[in-house]
Image (cartoon, grey):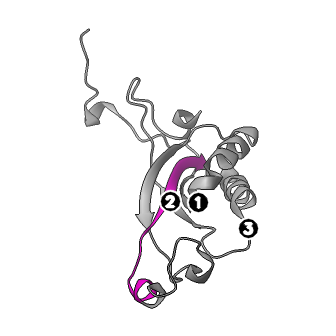
Amino acid sequence: MKVTPFPAEDRTFNLKAKLMKLILAMIRIAKMSETKIALSDAGLPSFTAMPVLGRGKGHGDLEKAPFVDPEHLELISEMPRLKSKRMITLVVTDEKKDLAVETIIKANHTGRSGDGRIFVIDTVDSIRVRTAETGDITLD
C-alpha cells in the first residue's frame, strides 16, 4: 500500500470550523464503565482512556482502610502516595462542552475526596490522518 503524505502547504485551516475543546478528566478506576456508558448515551462515544498515577491535596482516609496496620498509620500518612486513576480525553465542539463536563460529573460524583478533576482546554485544530480533513468535521 502506497502512502501519500499530505504536506502542510496542501492543508488549509478550516475557517468554517467550530471552536473545539479538549476535555481532560481524571476519574476513579471503579467509575470507568459507568463513565463510558454515560458518554456514549450522551452522544459522545469517542474518547481515549489511559491509566495514570496522581494525587490531589488530600491524603485519603487511611483510618478506614482495612489493610493498614494502626502501628504504621503515622508513617504511611506522612509519605506522599500516588493513586491509580483513569485519564479520559475527548475533543468536542464548543457547543458540546457543557454536555461532556456534566456527563462526566454525573457519572463520577460521590461527594467524597478523590472524585476527580476535569480540565477544559481550547483546541486549535484537529486533523484526520487518513484524509487530511481538518476542523470539527473530524470529530464525528
Using the rendered view, name the quadrant where residue 42 is placed.
top right
Please tell me how crowded label 1 is: few (under 14), some (14-19), or many (20+) other residues with Cα within 10 Å. Answer: some
- Point 51% across, 76% down: residue: 68
Image position, residue 55 (x, y; %): 46, 73
Task: Report the quarter where the C terminus lies.
Answer: top right
- Point 45% across, 91% down: residue: 74
Q: Amino acid at mark 2?
A: Lys
Q: Mark 2 and mark 1 in contact (Cβ < 8 Å)?
A: yes
- Point 51% across, 51% down: residue: 89
Provide the secondary structure element on which disc 3 rests.
Answer: loop
**Residue 77 colored magenta?**
yes
Mark 3 and mark 2 lie on one chain; the one further toward the N terminus is 2
The residue pinned by badge 3 equals: 110
Image position, residue 57 (x, y; %): 50, 83
Provide the secondary structure element on which disc 1 rests.
Answer: loop
Q: Amino acid at mark 1?
A: Arg
- Point 55% across, 40% down: residue: 136
Mark 1 and mark 2 lie on one chain; the one further toward the N terminus is 1
Residue most toward the top?
1
Using the rendered view, name the quadrant where residue 17 is placed.
top right
For the record, the magenta segment spans 75-92
Q: Is residue 84 left or right of residue 61?
A: left
Residue 28 — which label?
A: 1
**Residue 16 colored magenta?**
no
Q: Is residue 131 left or right of residue 44?
A: left
Question: What is the CA distance from the residue labelled 3 to the residue labelled 1?
Answer: 10 Å
Residue 85 — which label?
A: 2
Q: Is residue 60 above or below residue 120?
A: below
